[in-house]
């Protein structure tokens, strides 16, 4: 959202710059067009003035010529008046033309030529009427001078007409330019103004959309702010910022509540904040704040605050520096109320202490079970053995039956105590993992079961195992229990056969591994040809004291497989079982490969 608004602002700024540029161009072109039109108008006026003055000169010459003829015919000096005044007027016109043609060299030269011809024509006129002898118009000299004057007048008229023609052509050209400027200027101005209006509309439309988007964003921010406030209240934490350059703090509303105050009830400064800190923590917190200002970082710190009602709260604070849009370093921090956590931790400590006491009591119980309970059991078995040896023939059939039952009960009691001790040892926390030769541990387990294996003629085959990091004595006990279990539940009349295999597998390919924490595991499989079991009891057989068969059918305490499961769990592995009645059972152990 912020990126989109930034892009829109850049677009809007560019559009406004272009609009301003177009307006400046419109103004410049308008000024240029008006200047050109004014210049064209002045040139046209100038051409008109030149033509008017030329026409005026020609008219004055004609008047002078007409007056000359009238004088010749009538000898009346009144007819000389146009000549006399015409000369003055012609001079005035030439003076005006001199001003008008000061920048036009060609026209100036043409006027000089015309002026020379006019002077000759006026001189010829003067010579003609002065040389007229007694009104004799037939005089040859007079006729010659008269004709020369006429030729000069024709030449003057032709030159002036030529100049006027050139000026008219120039006038026509200037009118065309003037009309072109008059037509092009409004069209250009209209086009540029239209472009400006389009750009301004685009800018307005963009501003309108941005305002709507900004309004929606502000509403979302208000919702987010309220959500954040509620979240801070629910999670019991507050936020704060520290502007390094300005040395200013800002506190969220809930930070004030953590201090037991109303939101924004005091100025957010360190000095004001320290007034709420527990006296024993003020010095430590002050030092940590100074380090925060120096390093622009605040690691997790813990301190207590005291509310006005006397309640003590435990707080935890943390801060991380960022650089804002104004290139200012700002420390963003959060402060959480961890009073409930502290209370829970203390309760946990008390429970851990209680658990440790219970463990010590359990250890005492183990000692009692392994020594004090077994001692009277041994005496019972000893006295029963003596009673049988000494009184065997003296007891009744019922008495012998009772003694057998007492012996069986004592034996089961001894097995139960031994298995409980074994289970207790598998639960101990002092588990030392070592790189172990599994083949040696398997052989040690066979030695522990040598008598049973020999008595039942059991056949045990196994793969060669790699070195695995395990708790050695527990893995040996695992082998003892699983092999012993397979021999115990053998098929009547069949030699027990146990096959132990090993392979390395990927966790994702094994259905028995649920939510694996490792990618690869050692898979150790124990397969026997014993009595098997119904698969519906596959999970039940690992439960403590769980038995699938009557104790009169098979001896045991129901603890052996529970010990196996506990050992595998100590190794963060898995153990599963499957079987079919009268067809044997399969126990699978997965031990993780740590990488």
Image (cartoon, helix red, strand yellow):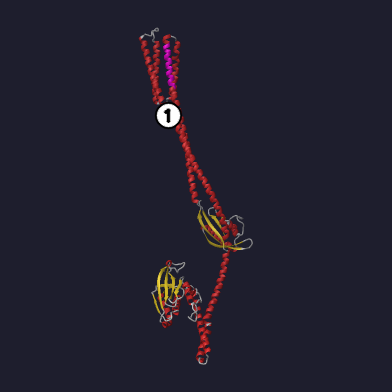
**Residue 552: % across, % down:** 49, 81
Residue 22 vs residue 416, the one in the foreground: 416
Q: Residues within 10 Å of mark 1 (few under 14, many from 20)?
A: few
**Residue 73: % across, % down:** 42, 9
405 w.r.t. 98: above or below: below
Residue 31 in magenta?
Answer: no
Residue 62 in magenta?
Answer: yes
- Asked whether residue 534 is in view, the answer is yes
Instruction: Please tell me which residue is depicted at 53% across the width and 56% down the height of the picture.
Output: 332
**Boundaries of the magenta span:** 52-70
Residue 537 vs residue 112, the one in the foreground: 537
Residue 479 found in image quarter:
bottom left
Q: Residue furthest front?
A: 582
> Which quadrant of the rendered structure holds the C terminus?
bottom left
- Asked whether residue 274 is in view, the answer is no
115 w.r.t. 352: above or below: above
Does the magenta stretch mainly form a helix, a strand or a loop?
A: helix
Secondary structure, mark 1, is helix
Question: Badge 1 is on which residue?
Answer: 176
Q: Residue furthest bottom?
A: 394
**Residue 140: % across, % down:** 35, 10
Task: Name the side, left or right, on which 122 lies relative to 303.
Answer: left
457 w.r.t. 157: above or below: below
């Amino acid at each position: 959202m912020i990126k989109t608004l930034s892009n829109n602002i850049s677009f809007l700024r560019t559009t406004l710059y272009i609009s301003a540029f177009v307006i400046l161009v419109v103004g410049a072109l308008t000024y240029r067009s008006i200047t050109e039109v004014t210049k064209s108008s002045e040139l046209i006026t100038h051409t008109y003035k030149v033509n008017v003055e030329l026409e005026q000169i020609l008219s004055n010459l004609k008047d002078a010529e007409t007056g000359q003829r009238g004088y010749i015919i009538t000898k009346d000096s009144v007819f000389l008046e146009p000549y006399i005044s015409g000369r003055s007027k012609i001079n005035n016109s030439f003076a005006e033309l001199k001003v008008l043609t000061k920048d036009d060299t060609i026209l100036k030269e043409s006027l000089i030529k015309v002026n020379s011809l006019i002077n000759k024509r006026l001189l010829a006129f003067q010579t003609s009427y002065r040389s007229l002898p007694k009104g004799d118009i037939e005089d040859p000299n007079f006729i010659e001078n008269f004709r020369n004057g006429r030729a000069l007048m024709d030449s003057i008229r032709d030159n002036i007409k030529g100049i006027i023609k050139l000026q008219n052509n120039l006038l026509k050209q200037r009118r065309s330019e003037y009309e072109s400027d008059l037509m092009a200027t409004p069209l250009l101005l209209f086009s540029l103004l239209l472009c400006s209006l389009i750009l301004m509309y685009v800018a307005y439309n963009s501003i309108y959309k941005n305002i709507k988007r900004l309004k929606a964003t502000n509403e979302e921010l208000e919702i987010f702010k309220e959500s954040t406030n509620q979240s801070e209240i629910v999670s019991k934490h507050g936020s704060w910022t520290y502007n390094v350059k300005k040395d200013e703090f800002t506190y969220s509303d809930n930070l004030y509540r953590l201090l037991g105050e109303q939101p924004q009830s005091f100025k957010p400064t360190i000095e004001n904040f320290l007034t709420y800190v527990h006296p024993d923590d003020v010095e430590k917190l002050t030092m940590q704040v100074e380090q925060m200002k120096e390093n622009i970082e605040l690691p997790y710190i813990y301190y207590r605050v005291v509310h006005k009602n006397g309640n003590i709260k435990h707080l935890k604070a943390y801060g991380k520096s960022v650089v804002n849009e104004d290139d200012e370093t700002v420390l963003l921090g959060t402060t959480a109320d961890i009073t409930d956590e502290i209370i829970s931790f203390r309760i946990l400590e008390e429970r851990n202490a209680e658990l440790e006491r219970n463990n010590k009591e359990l250890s005492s119980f183990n000692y009692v079970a392994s020594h004090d309970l077994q001692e009277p059991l041994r005496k019972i078995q000893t006295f029963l053995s003596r009673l049988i040896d000494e009184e065997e023939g003296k007891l009744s059939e019922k008495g012998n039956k009772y003694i057998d039952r007492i012996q069986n009960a004592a034996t089961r009691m001894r097995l139960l105590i031994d298995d409980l001790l074994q289970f207790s040892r598998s639960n101990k926390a002092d588990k030392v993992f070592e790189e172990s030769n599994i083949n040696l541990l398997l052989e040690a387990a066979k030695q522990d079961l040598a008598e049973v294996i020999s008595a039942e003629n059991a056949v045990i085959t196994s793969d060669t195992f790699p070195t695995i990091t395990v708790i050695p004595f527990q893995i040996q006990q695992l082998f003892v229990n699983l092999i012993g279990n397979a021999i115990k539940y053998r098929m009547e009349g069949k030699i027990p056969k146990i096959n132990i295999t090993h392979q390395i597998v990927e966790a994702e390919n094994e259905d028995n591994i649920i939510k694996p924490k490792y990618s690869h595991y050692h898979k150790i499989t124990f397969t026997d040809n014993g009595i098997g079991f119904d698969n519906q009891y596959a999970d039940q057989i690992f439960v403590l004291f769980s038995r699938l068969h009557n104790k009169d059918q098979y001896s045991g305490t129901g603890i052996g497989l529970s010990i196996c499961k506990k050992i595998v769990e100590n190794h963060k592995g898995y153990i599963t079982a499957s079987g079919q009645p009268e067809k044997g059972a399969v126990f699978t152990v997965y031990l993780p490969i740590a990488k």
